[in-house]
Image: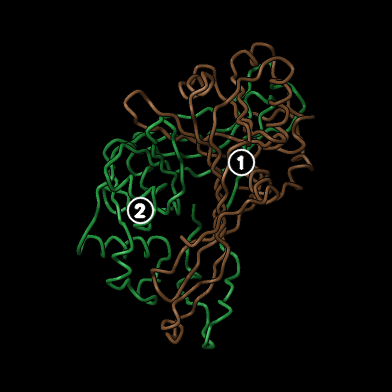
Chain colours: A green, B brown
Amino acid sequence: MPDKQVHDREVLDRLLDAALVGHVAVVDDDGQPFVLPVAVARDGDRLLVHGSTASRLFRILAAGAPTCLTVTAVDGLVLARSQFESSMHYRSAVVLGRCVVLDGPDKAAALRTLTEHLMPGRGADAREASGKELGATTVLAMPLDEWSLKVSDSAPDDAPEDLDRPVWAGVVPLQRGWGAPVPAPDLRFDLPVPAYVGTWPSRG
Amino acid sequence: MPDKQVHDREVLDRLLDAALVGHVAVVDDDGQPFVLPVAVARDGDRLLVHGSTASRLFRILAAGAPTCLTVTAVDGLVLARSQFESSMHYRSAVVLGRCVVLDGPDKAAALRTLTEHLMPGRGADAREASGKELGATTVLAMPLDEWSLKVSDSAPDDAPEDLDRPVWAGVVPLQRGWGAPVPAPDLRFDLPVPAYVGTWPSRG
């Protein structure tokens, strides 16, 4: 895909701050990699992830195994006049390193950051984690030290000899938005959908 | 995240057939994994990917390194009454194995399948790859032999003692759609956007 390396931290932050999930890898003793989706939130110069203490993935990451956390947004399809030059608009951040286990006040604060990142406004509504729930959760931070960012956002780049083909060319943007909220079947009160849900920006 | 293992091949195919990209991993000699996005298309019992012959990722995959190709769709946010039970609706397929290099007629057919999967209708419009372009492209197939699929699609599952909290709970769906096509700046003819673009279903 025709992409370019981007070194602008602001472009990285914009991608990460709109992301809901990334894909993280661990490797077993036979060299077999496993790639799994995780919810992510940027907290300054680190990426936060959380999962069950019972999860094999989180046990391996918590032990400090080398890992890679990749966050990708697909922004559209590029229809060139040739199939060879047809491609996608996308942004993809690859973060390499090892995770650090968070504990104590840093852990609780990280969970609040995750909630507010994934569901802005929800932190004040939904009950915070109890001590038992905190104990069942592993919270990890991946430093934003070693990262690379690729961005593809150009118009179709057809070869000169293809430009006279009478074929439409251009970009079809892929958009994301929120659908109508679906109340829980066991909702006990006649509550409206919270106003903050209506303010959520497009994500992912 | 509260998910369930699903063994239904039809659910797998539905996820793969709506996907534009997956995340594939390779591992270097030091055990460091790298996770990168790739365009994917299902072709029967295999997943097709393609890239530049100059790409390090594709050279490693073409050599038969053990890999993992994961395809994820995020379908919504689950707002529970507790932050602990809050989560996402998602579907994620993890495919393990090694890629096979495609050549000859199988390679050309696979590229046509990729184009028609990613941009239905486009195969008849955009010029097919020349011999030189074919030579610059690696096309790989990953067999759908060893796969697992997780699906999270349930209503919030709050603890009984949280149900009396006067807090709205439910699911906010995340939707995807196509935006208005943007013609290439160097379009030489007054061509309408192709009709097939208007028929594209929601993807990813």
Which percent across, then down, holds residue B30?
31, 26
Single out the mark in the foreground, 2 or 1.
Answer: 2
Q: Are marks 2 and 1 on the same chain?
A: no
Horizontal placement of B5 versus A168: left or right?
left
Residue sitting at x 60%, y 25%: B140
Q: Which element carries disc 1, helix, strand or loop?
A: loop
Look at label 1 and name its amino acid.
Leu
Give the side of residue B68 with respect to residue B46, left or right: left
Q: Along the horizontal axis of the image, is A134 left or right of A91?
A: left
Residue A177 visible here:
no
Residue at left offset 44%, top offset 35%:
A33
Say if B1 sits above or below B47 in the image. Answer: below
What separation in Å lies between label 2 and label 1 (alpha carbons)? 25 Å
Vertical comparison of B49 with A39: above or below = above
Outermost residue, left side:
A104
Give the vertical position of B13 relative to A31 (above or below): below
- Image coordinates of residue A70 in percent, x first then y, are 42, 41
Amino acid marked by disc 2: Val
Of residues A103 and A20, which is closer to you in this image? A103
Picture layout, residue B126 above or below residue A189: above
Q: Secondary structure at mark 2?
A: strand
Q: Which residue is mark 1?
A: B20
Where residue A125 sits in the image (x, y, percent)? Answer: 39, 77
Picture quarter containing residue B83?
bottom left
With B148 as the anchor, is B31 left or right in this view?
Answer: left
Residue topped by disc 2: A49
Q: Is residue B164 visible?
A: yes
Picture quadrant where residue B129 is located: top right
Tag 1, which chain? B
Q: Residue at x 60, y 19 (%)?
A: B137
Badge count: 2
Which of the 4 image quarters holds residue A117? bottom left
